[in-house]
Amino acid sequence: HVIFCALSPSEFNRVLSIDSAKEMWDRLMVTYEGTNQAKDTKINRLVHDYELFTMLENENISSMYARFNDIINALKEEAKDLSTLPLEDLLGSLMTHELRMNDQARNEPKKKTIALKALKDKESDEDE
């Protein structure tokens, strides 16, 4: 009943047919935070933004700093706390990372090495 009272009309309609508070909470959590896959995608985008962060053209220092802080704060909110992360979730994350690394290694083009044969000039033998 407390959850129903705290919801807006549109949120209320999402959970009206659900009987247990746990199911309501889970539905609202997915609605606002997304699934694990959506969270991972968001984290990857934020890490990408962080790694490629540069000052924009015609941007002043204070707005650049604010934009950088937005990225950092979003990463802090989205990052998993390893002290409260269940071991099974950590294992799953590590296995997913390993699969991505293996896929990336397979998809990288094979680098060809080229060896050039040196021609010896009879007159330059003395210089060698």
Image (cartoon, rainbow, N blue to C red):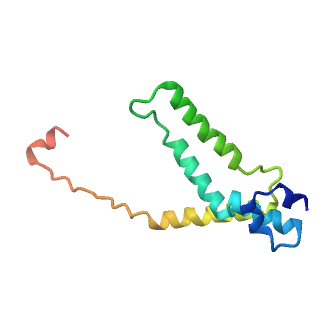
* 93 vs 118, nearest the viewer: 93
Give the vertical position of 2 relative to 127 (above or below).
Answer: below
Residue 48 position within the rendered picture, expressed as x and y whole percent measured from the top left: 53, 48
Q: In which quarter of the image is residue 7?
A: bottom right
- Specify the farthest residue to the top: 61
- Which quarter shows the N terminus? bottom right
Residue 94 position within the rendered picture, expressed as x and y whole percent measured from the top left: 68, 61
Residue 111 located left or right of residue 40:
left
Q: Quadrant of residue 21?
A: bottom right
The residue positioned 69% from the left and 43% from the top of the image is 76
- Specify the farthest residue to the front: 9
- Specify the farthest residue to the left: 123
Residue 99 located left or right of residue 86:
left
Residue 53 position within the rendered picture, expressed as x and y whole percent measured from the top left: 49, 39
* 121 vs 45, nearest the viewer: 45
* 112 vs 29, nearest the viewer: 29
Residue 66 position within the rendered picture, expressed as x and y whole percent measured from the top left: 57, 32
- Which quarter shows the C terminus? top left
Give the vertical position of 70 relative to 48 (above or below).
Answer: above
